[in-house]
Amino acid sequence: MQAKRIISCLDVDDGRVVKCVKFKDIRDAGDPVELARRYNADGADELTFLDIGASYKSRATLLDVVKKVAAEVFIPLCVGGGIREVDDMRSAMNAGADKVSVCTSALKRPELLREMAASYGSQCVVLSIDAKRTGGGKEKLRWNAFSHGGRTDTGIDAVEWAQKAVEHGAGEILLNSIDADGTGAGYDLELNRRILNAVPVPVIASGGAGTLDQIASVLLSTANPEMDEEANAENCCGADAALVASLLHFGKTTITEIKKHAAGKGVCVR
């Protein structure tokens, strides 16, 4: 059984880690280098740095942070935000990133994914999907992919976009639920299930972690062997990794506690 990953996410703006609710209401969460050291020591499987400003200036600041972190920690680093061409990917990789994530630039020009994969391999290309519910009722439920930090509805179906992106070279999906982001109400399990069933690459669940049970649920393929299939489907989805931010930044739990709890629920963790 492949071990599930617990990934700490650091949204960086002007050199500081910040946290939002539904991609709005930004508040300061601390120093990125200090937090990265803490999460590395506590057993995080990966660190994801996202430049939420995504301007040239803010990306340069982020890459400086990545250089400092890469010199001190020894777990994979993913960098995203403002990656518009292969040269931007090259700059991130040279700064110490092991892979990069792209969102808006790939929506604008899907061929970018193919170019990035050709240069560094699909394992280094993460497609970040900012998805928001736009349909009602379970049968008509739909999520659209949003661009520009969750501000622009592209009208593109998120599931279809995930499939197309993998065909173009994306080796992993970072799936961000705009509806759940920062709420602590739990991951959007149905959204994650839809994407997991549609693509053959790893899916990282992001947005909504509020309790240890919620993190375990999004990682579990079967919540309880004694429950019927429909009940299980409502309580788990089998994501390959869980992204966690607010719970860690504001001291509500630790990586160690998350892994211990998940293991107790039957999740295979490192």
Image: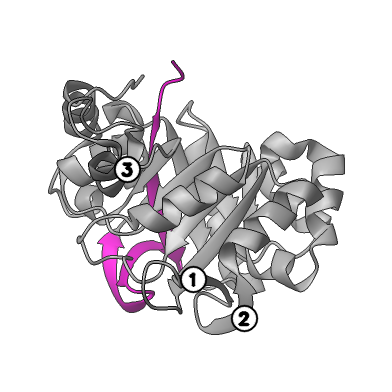
The residue tagged 3 is 218
**Over which residues does the magenta segment extend?**
1-29
Corner quadrant of residue 73: top left
Q: Where is residue 157 shown, x and y percent of the image?
A: 60, 70
CB contact under 8 Å: marks 3 and 2: no
Looking at marks 3 and 2 on the same chain, the residue that comes earlier in the sequence is marked by 2
Tell me the crowding category of disc 3: few under 14, some 14 to 19, or many 20 or more residues within 10 angstroms, Cα based: many
What separation in Å lies between label 1 and label 2 (alpha carbons)?
11 Å
Q: Name the residue under label 1.
A: 142
User: Is residue 30 rendered to the left or right of residue 63?
Assistant: left
Residue 125 visible, this orientation? yes
The residue most toward the top is: 1
User: In the rendered picture of this protein, how many numbered marks are placed on residues?
Assistant: 3
Residue linked to disc 2? 155
Label 1: which secondary element: loop
Q: What residue type is labelled 1?
A: Arg
